[in-house]
Image: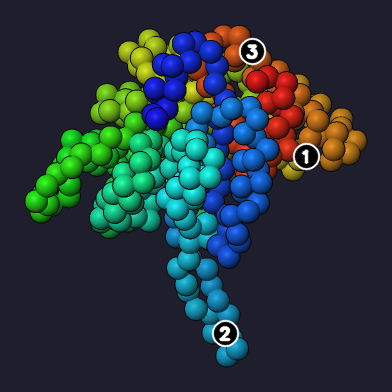
Amino acid sequence: MKVTDHIAAAQGKTLFSFEVLPPLKGNTIDSLFGTIERLMQFDPKFIDVTSHREEYVFKKHESGLLQKIHTRKRPGTVGICAAIQNKFRIDTVPHIICGGFSREETEYALIDLHYLGIDNALVLRGDALKNEGSFTPDPHGHAYAIDLLRQVKNLNQGKYLYDEVQNSNPSNFCIGVAGYPEKHFEAPSLKADLKHLKAKVDAGGDYIVTQMFFNNEHFFKFVADCRAAGITVPIIPGLKPLTAKGQLQSIPRNFHLNLPDDLIEAVEAAKTPEAVKQVGVEWCIAQSKELMAKGAPVLHYYTMSKADETEQIATALF
Ligand code: FAD
């Protein structure tokens, strides 16, 4: 079932959903299943599975020579979605990214998803490689999420690449896009970012899911700006509890957002790692309660594939 159908069926009730990461290459899926098992009691309507592009690593040989190797550390998004759907009978939302993928590879992944009965996809550009200054698309891939979205939209109309197919069975993906309440870091202004977001929705984005934020005012303003710009699709807030003192630096650095002073002070005053986690969980519960009261269609949690904090938060809410 599509994300937008779940939202429509809920008739205004706030739904619960969360995001997980594929396991690191070489690990089993068991620990991920364990996380999902613990969160099933809160009746999630869908689970997002992130997607990770190839990276370069340097392997040192006995001779001392370094060999540059391409590797994907967290492969398997399509297979994991299928495994989750099969085991838990729950809808999954694979993330599909431009970075590191050609149009052909994307088409094959979409065809696999269609055969598997997965009818949701969150389309994203992806970030630059760690050793790249800025995002470089695959030579045969897409430069922006909107280009990828158009490919999915085409497939939904039975238009395959190169028009070589004898039959043109259409897919039926509900397409999500990303939004940034505090602006995507590359955009010159919030207004410019909003213009590109509107273009994604106008091109067929069915719903928006946001980057995490720790001050609800950013989200409320973002929703108001979207509505004023004529964006009418559901906007799902993405939430993550802060879980360690080091995240006071790493979250702003990695996700390009601001943390509220009250939260910073509470974390700095916490005496133990457990106390920091408690501050993060309580902050996220307070955020969630307010978002729920103001009618958020879904509360979507970034779990990093760990159940502990999300379980505590969901216990207080769902
Ligand atoms: P886009 O919508 O393409 O926008 C990227 C930038 O380009 C923005 O600054 C935008 O304003 C600008 N822009 C857009 N169109 C144009 C245009 N035509 N001309 C000029 N500028 C333009 N990354 C992963 O690698 N894997 C994941 O699984 C993943 N999941 C995510 C889930 C969510 C909910 C979010 C919010 C992010 C996720 N990301 C993921 C990170 C995401 O890939 C990055 O934030 C990336 O830098 C931007 O992706 P986007 O889809 O928003 O890009």
The Cα–Cα distance between marks 3 and 2, rounded to whole angstroms, is 55 Å
Who is closer to the viewer here, 205 or 255?
A: 205
Q: Identify the residue at horizontal 62%, vertical 41% (top origin).
A: 36
Label 3: which secondary element: helix
Label 1: which secondary element: loop
Mark 3 vs mark 2: which is more N-terminal? 2
- Residue 157 quadrant: top left
Residue 181 visible in the current orientation: no
Q: Can you give x and y, in whole percent of width and height, for residue 274 in the image?
A: 85, 38
Q: What kind of residue is marked 3?
A: Glu
Identify the mark at residue 245; answer none if there is no mark. 1
The nearer-to-camera label among 3 and 1 is 3
The Cα–Cα distance between marks 3 and 1, rounded to whole angstroms, is 25 Å
Mark 2 vs mark 1: which is more N-terminal? 2
- Residue 273 quadrant: top right
Identify the mark at residue 61; answer none if there is no mark. 2
Label 2: which secondary element: loop
Relative horizontal placement of residue 176, taking residue 130 as reference (left or right): left
Q: Can you give x and y, in whole percent of width and height, for residue 120 in the image?
A: 38, 35
Q: Which residue was labeled with disc 3? A: 290
